Amino acid sequence: MSTVLAPARRREPAVLRTRQIHAVAACYFVASFAALGLPPYLTEILPSLGDREARWAGLLYIVPTVFGALCAPVWGRLADRYGRKRLLLRAQLGLAVSFVLAGWADSLPAFAAALVLQGVLGGTFAASNGYLAAAIDGHRLSWALTLMQGAARLALVAAPVVVGSLSPWITPHRQYAVLAVLPLAAALMLAALPEPPRTRRDEHPAPDTGETAGDGGDTAADPTSPATGALRTLYALEFAFVLATVVSYPYLITLIGQRLPGLGSVAGGVLFALPHVCYPLLAKPVHTAVAGRPLLGAVTGFGLVAVALAGHWGAGTMASFVVLRLLLGAGMTLGLVSLSALAADASRGRRPGRMFGTLEFISKAGAVVAGVVAALSNDVWGPAAPIVAGSAVAALTAIVSTPVLLRWSR
């Protein structure tokens, strides 16, 4: 299948070299280390703050996400108006401040307030993507967004293992303060990068309704055509993918502890991170395979995620967990790379700050719903229930998306 959007108008030459794109991805990795790696240990952090049974873990897992979702569109519009680099630096510094406050919080309300601040002042992923989309486009942008997802996966691989390894000397709670140095370092590195120039689309952007911009302005289209429905399809798939995968995060380590008693926190962290190991290994060949047919890749990814998560219900051995986590990793890689390709297509002719801010809102909304579903289902049916719920969402999305795929493939 060909790309799902009409060809873009001619743009100014890209302003970022390959090494600078890699620098942006590296900065996102170091800045997201605490933000992505420490929340799985909320069930260990909260008892020291008065929540002995860690009943608030599922909801606090999504507190930064809730406020990040609310603020992402605003920060995106400000980036389009005042400069993408400036707002990217703001996001990194905001994370540093919130991590320090979280690490030194001595009560549950103070810790929750720091997580709120993390959501309000953060948004490094949307800010980084908006910065990249303002400087490059087409296949380079698709691959750059894939690298950004790779940075997130690497953080999810490394951080749980590092946090578990350091726990005997520094509690996961205090590690928030220690890891605040990482977004500070990222801000220093990003300060040396150029500010993307303003282009014609900043003055005459296409609306965020799935339509593409032509030289004469916005074009009307059949609402069932790929060009008109592409952005709405991207948003729907992003929401469903985040919901299906994130719902399995908060109580996974608890489930592993129940099924494999005596395994230890380090091994539990490795199993949590295992699907994300697949991404840096498979991203490049998967990107080559799905770049021209991203919707097919996304539907296939949802199918693999559904099968892998469903298998967690009956897993009871180390071998079964390893196989299921690797299968989940393959599905996540397919889904994430395909969504990156769809996002690169959708950003053509649009203000990148606004579009990626909205996409971040959609993504975080999916994570918010995932946290609520995880907390409620865990309370009623136990830690395996959220994972099975994620399987159901993935399976339903694959089924619903298949007719769209078939129509667009004609």
Image (cartoon, helix red, strand yellow):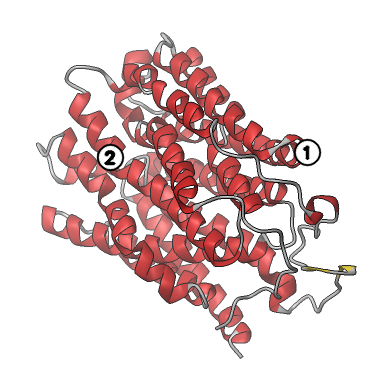
Q: Position of residue 253 (x, y in %)?
A: 26, 40
Q: Position of residue 99 (x, y in %)?
A: 45, 21
List the single residue furthest toward the left.
Answer: 262
Q: Is residue 360 above or below residue 110?
A: below
Q: Position of residue 301 (x, y in %)?
A: 41, 68
Looking at numbered disc 1 in the image, what kind of residue is underneath it?
Answer: Arg
**Image point (53%, 31%), residue name:** 63
Would you name the residue on which mark 2 appears?
Answer: 158
The earlier-in-sequence mark between 2 and 1 is: 1
Q: Is residue 80 above or below residue 223?
A: above
Residue 262 appearing in the image: yes
Looking at numbered disc 2 in the image, what kind of residue is underneath it?
Answer: Ala
Which of the pair 176/195 is nearer the observer? 195
Residue 143 is left or right of residue 223, and the answer is left
Quarter of the image holding residue 33?
top left
Residue 11 is left or right of residue 318, and the answer is right
Q: Is residue 285 above or below residue 194?
A: below
Residue 19 is left or right of residue 271, and the answer is right
Residue 54, disc: none
Q: Residues within 10 Å of mark 2 (few under 14, many from 20)?
A: some
Q: CA distance from mark 2 to mark 1?
A: 36 Å
**Image point (29%, 25%), residue name:** 44
**Image point (55%, 49%), residue name:** 366
Secondary structure type for disc 2: helix
**Picture quarter with the N terminus:** bottom right
Quarter of the image holding residue 326?
bottom left
Residue 81, disc: 1
Q: Is residue 394 above or below residue 106?
A: below
